[in-house]
Image (cartoon, rainbow, N blue to C red):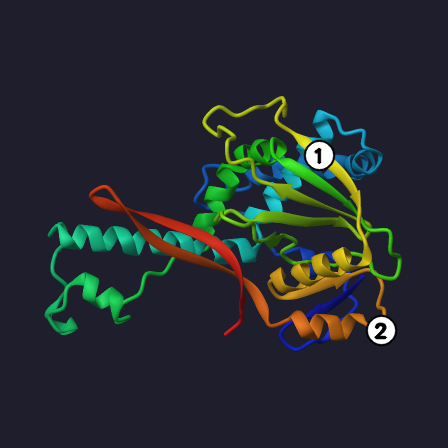
Amino acid sequence: MYAIRKSDLKLFTPNAQSVCRIEEGSTNLYLREDRIIEEFLKRIEPGYSAALTNLMKGKIDQESIFVIAGFVAYVSTCPPAAMRIYSASLKAVVEHTAIILDSKGSLPLPPLELGGKNLSELLQNGEIQVNIDPKYPQAFGIASILSHTITYGNYTWDILINPFEDSPFFTSDFPIAIERVHNTHIPNKIIPLAPYIAIRIRPNLSYDRKNPNYSFSGFKYTIRKLNRSEVVTINRLIVRCAETTVFFRDNFNWVLNFVKKNSGFRIETITGNLPYEKGSILWSTQEISKIN
């Protein structure tokens, strides 16, 4: 396995444990059982290889859907990148709520040392800031891991076969590439599962999350063999969405320059307000943005 850091383009050859493991990274003290995610992964990890084989053959049973959807749920909610991305959403919610409470006079006045300004003014001009413990959104992700798994398993998947030995799929420390969809804030997710296979998960906006479908009867899929241009496009998204490090199987001479061209990006959370009745709706989405 080879790796390139996006920050300085340093190439190195790590072992899996040194780059894919953070000491106590999945321990979360906000949860009643702080290592509960390990119990979930005991069902995911042993079945991963068999599930990949079934995807390749088009023999996709409920267990294969559960294993792959569970893997996607885990890598999209628990890594450091996910903690950073979802912290931004919570920060926006806290700030929005604080401004509403302040406008209703429900909060005490700030101390005189802050110039007699109210909380809304202090937030808007940046004199005070809301900081979110990144372990808090991780706790939300772990607590809802089964719900995410069932939801992904009832979406439509494109199983993407990469036939090019000289251009295998990359992966990264955040192996969730987002793909914008016209007319919706919800992007597709592209997840590299192996150098020769990836999946694109297309959200089903009509899926009823309040009544989860444990039989995966909503699951639909297609199997597509990609052309070279499509492989390049997906690899570009994978590199741009990586948090800090890109991983790959073969150190071809084109790889370093490819990563260099796409290293100045990462996923950011974009939030906004929409007027609704007498108030507003706070929305958020994810976009690939240039790194400041």
- Tell me residue 219's x, y (percent): 65, 29
- Distance (Cα) linking label 2 and label 1: 35 Å
User: Would residue 191 be found to the left or right of residue 115 on screen?
Assistant: right
Comes first in the chain, label 2 or label 1: 1
Going by the numbered disc 1, the residue's amino acid type is: Tyr
User: Would residue 98 be found to the left or right of residue 21 on screen?
Assistant: left
Name the quadrant containing residue 70.
Answer: top right
Quadrant, the N terminus = bottom right
Q: Report if residue 14 is visible in the image.
A: yes
Residue 250 position (above or below residue 90): below
| Residue 89, numbered circle | none
Going by the numbered disc 2, the residue's amino acid type is: Asn
Q: Mark 1 — residue?
A: 221
- Tell me residue 236's x, y (percent): 69, 63
**Which residue is at the far front?**
183
Q: Mark 2 — residue?
A: 253
Residue drawn at the location 43% of the way across and 58% of the way down:
270
**Which residue is at the far bottom?**
8
Name the foreground residue: 44 vs 214: 214
Residue drawn at the location 83% of the way across and 37% of the way down:
53
